[in-house]
Image (cartoon, helix red, strand yellow):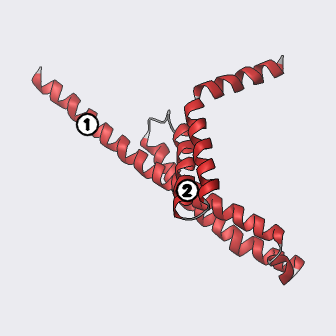
Amino acid sequence: MKVKKIQSALVRFLHRHRIALVLVVLLVIGVVFAGLHDVGVVLGILAAGVILVEIARGWRRIRNFILLFLGSFFGIIFLSFLDVGVVKPLVRLIGGEGAVSGAGFEVFNQIVSLIVLFFGTAGLITGFLGAVVLGIWRLVNLFNKRGTADNT
């Protein structure tokens, strides 16, 4: 019974977000083929942006977008500090200099860097633009309501 609920929820999710999922897959394939150069970075930020826009699609408050912006900003700072200030000294302390240049730490460092690059940037852009668009939308609606009250 529980498996059927999970399966039906997954089918509903895939059906509801299929265009965004296809777009993310195409952008990620573009990142793989373009590499992490200028075009690949832009495609990666766009893929992360599509994911964040799908998450934020139902948001109707400016506060949510401001929280996304601030969360992305402080998340970038936190992940950078975690990578440089905590993990690297711990790896150096536990494993020595050889561990810092080892494959395990390089993989961790690359993952953190890509999360900061793609999702940090996309979160900043999505949060800022969402707050600006909703702010303008609220102002337009406010002026429209005042205009109709004066004309009646």
Q: Position of residue 23 (x, y in %)?
A: 56, 40
Count the marks: how many?
2
Q: Which residue is mark 2?
A: 72
Q: Which mark is residue 95?
A: none
User: Which of marks 1 and 2 precedes in the sequence?
Assistant: 2
> Relative to 98, does residue 146 appear above or below in the rendering?
above
Q: Answer yes or no: do the residues labelled 2 and 1 have beta carbons within 8 Å?
A: no
**For this rendering, which residue is in front, 81 or 16?**
16
**For this rendering, which residue is in front, 146 or 34?**
34
Please indicate, yes or no, whether residue 6 appears anywhere in the rendered image: yes
Amino acid marked by disc 1: Val
Amino acid marked by disc 2: Ser
* Quarter that holds the N terminus: top right
Q: Is residue 53 left or right of residue 96?
A: left
Q: Which residue is mark 1?
A: 140
- What residue is shown at x 47% (from left), y 49% (from top)? 126
Q: Residue furthest right?
A: 95
**How far apart are the alpha carbons under marks 2 and 1?**
28 Å
> Relative to 146, does residue 35 appear above or below in the rendering?
below
- What residue is shown at x 44% (from left), y 38% (from top)? 61
Q: Position of residue 54 (x, y in %)?
A: 54, 37
Mark 2 Cα shell of 10 Å, populated few (<14), some (14-19), many (≥20): many
- What residue is shown at x 64% (from left), y 58% (from top)? 115
Q: Which of the 4 image quadrants contains residue 11? A: top right
Q: Residue furthest left?
A: 151
Q: Which of the 4 image quadrants contains residue 109? A: bottom right
**For this rendering, which residue is in front, 117 or 127?**
117
Q: Is residue 105 left or right of residue 83?
A: right
Please indicate, yes or no, whether residue 75 appears anywhere in the rendered image: no
Q: Which secondary structure lies at badge 2?
A: helix
Q: Which secondary structure lies at badge 1?
A: helix
Q: Residue furthest bottom?
A: 97
